[in-house]
Image (spheres, coloured by chain):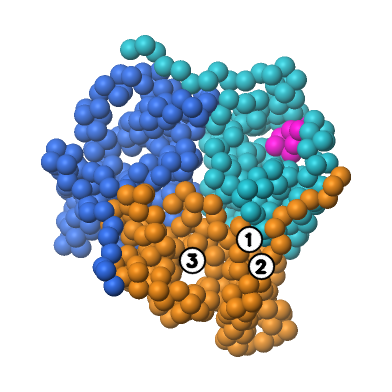
Chain colours: A orange, B cyan, C blue
Amino acid sequence: MDLLAVGIGSVQGAAFAAQFRDRRLDLLGVAIVGIATGFGGGLLRDILLGQVPLALQSNWYLPVATVAALVGMLLQRLVHRLGVTLNILDAVTIGMFGALGTTKALALGLPAVPAVFVGAVAAVGGSILRDLLLNLPIAIMQVGSLYAVAAIVGSATLVVLDALGADVLLAGIVCVAVTFGVRVLALAFHWSLPEQRHLPT
Amino acid sequence: MDLLAVGIGSVQGAAFAAQFRDRRLDLLGVAIVGIATGFGGGLLRDILLGQVPLALQSNWYLPVATVAALVGMLLQRLVHRLGVTLNILDAVTIGMFGALGTTKALALGLPAVPAVFVGAVAAVGGSILRDLLLNLPIAIMQVGSLYAVAAIVGSATLVVLDALGADVLLAGIVCVAVTFGVRVLALAFHWSLPEQRHLPT
Amino acid sequence: MDLLAVGIGSVQGAAFAAQFRDRRLDLLGVAIVGIATGFGGGLLRDILLGQVPLALQSNWYLPVATVAALVGMLLQRLVHRLGVTLNILDAVTIGMFGALGTTKALALGLPAVPAVFVGAVAAVGGSILRDLLLNLPIAIMQVGSLYAVAAIVGSATLVVLDALGADVLLAGIVCVAVTFGVRVLALAFHWSLPEQRHLPT
């Protein structure tokens, strides 16, 4: 399951990078962006939690992410034509990363608020690393369709359920469902956070 | 005290980000920049020291930084009009972050030189993360008013006092005072490091 | 040995940064780029492995990297005239960083594939941090002369030899030789990875 989510992230990261042909990325560059998008979130999560990253404790993550990245690059046009389908798959992916991150943070004894933070970082960290590596403005900081907000709401739901004594698996499934719901509704109805503004002081 | 310093950092980070209206940051983007500026230094400090970040061990840091960031955004004009006052508050802030970082590094057994390094990273790391997230040139690397230098001098003073057997609290207070002094004098007299140059080899 | 490699990295990082005079870097900025290039790879390696960075456990790394960076800045023209010589020295450097990183990862019990990854990050991480700090496109992701590929091939050779029961020191020397060979041959014959492309789906 986790591997599948990493693979979906890598396909998307590479297909995203493939739009920027003026960057003259080579095959390794595409693989790096794919790997960063696919398990960047898990990497940041484990670094914040002071753990050796899970993705470095198995032989499978790196090859899966690399192959997924090269597939994403080759099938770039197909990936972009799949737009909506992929956005829906991706909403499941960020939900899963968020649920895993929040659960792991709670299991390691973090309080509620930082656990939501770690869950959100796990969900959207891959997209942040991707943008940093490509020298692009960080997408989740700009006016958009509640990508990070969905992860925050989902993770917060998990923390609340956990505090109410709910079963871990159940809380995780609700987290994925809430993240998915917020993200898909935001896409469907073009919900977004207001742009920054200031008082006329 | 630490929370207050985080809050001041977040106000400034958000007010700084608010200048770049062409970035189309949304409320979450402003909050992220504020959080990164406010406790980015402590985060980098604890990652370098192999510890779970202090800011993730309490429920208070994230809400304080988020609220401070939104206040900084709303009162952006006021913040910029407060320029000098805020620079002075900020000089106390980097002194405190530097003192805490250096003391923590020494307490964990690091030698003198790396302890100064960790103190300086703790002091200016928030400003580095802020510039990375906003795709801006890293301000402390450019000709400026001894922002990082003040933190390095202050941290080095603390390490020397510690080696001479001074009381931890006293050494910390001197560190804050020295950092504050160097920074404020640099602002007042426009001191700066020379720009890079090279020999005509 | 490790210190020498850090010094060579720092000289190069600073001489590289010195090309960008429009950035108005001051002496501290040059030192930061030099430090990041010189031991950024080791820093990332140890953060991924959940260890306190080796460079922070000794008083020597920071002064060596700083002095090397300032020398690299002052002798910038000489460094650029030394182009080929320095590239050859640098090929030894990335080989050594890769060998140390891979060996350390294996020693801490990481499986084969992540160990190669850690070795490659240790070898080229300095160059990635340098480009991030200077807001430049990440050089190793672009069409170039097998810089990161050489490190990956070298680290993979070490892992294979280790699995075959070879002596650690011998495996390390072969790793340096292979990395060096791939890199120097790539420079000599202008080998590079193909640019990204996609299928006409």
**Looking at the rendering, in which quadrant would you find the N terminus of chain A?**
bottom left
Is residue B88 part of the magenta span, yes or no?
yes
| Residue C145, quarter of the rendered image | top left
Circles 2 and 1 on the same chain: yes
Q: What's the magenta region?
A: B87-95
Indicate which disc, 1 or 3, sits on the residue closer to the N terminus: 3
Label 1, residues with CA under 10 Å away: few <14, some 14-19, many ≥20: many
Residue C20, image x, y percentages: 44, 29
Regarding residue B167, the answer to whether it shows in the image is no
Q: Which residue is mark 2?
A: A192
**At label 1, which amino acid type do we have?**
Val
In front of the other: B65 or A17: A17
Q: Which residue is mark 3?
A: A42
How far apart marks 2 and 1 lie (CA) works out to 7 Å
**At label 2, which amino acid type do we have?**
Ser
Q: On residue A143, which mark appears?
A: 1
Label 2 lies in what chain? A
The secondary structure type at the circle numbered 2 is loop
Label 3 lies in what chain? A
**Residue under the point 63% across and 48% down:** B22
Q: Is there a contact, CB below 8 Å, between mark 2 and mark 1?
A: yes
The secondary structure type at the circle numbered 3 is helix
Indicate which disc, 2 or 1, sits on the residue closer to the N terminus: 1
Tell me: residue A18, above or below residue A102.
Answer: above
Indicate which disc, 3 or 2, sits on the residue closer to the N terminus: 3
Residue B30, image x, y percentages: 68, 54
Q: On residue A26, which mark appears?
A: none
Residue A56, image x, y percentages: 39, 64
The secondary structure type at the circle numbered 1 is loop
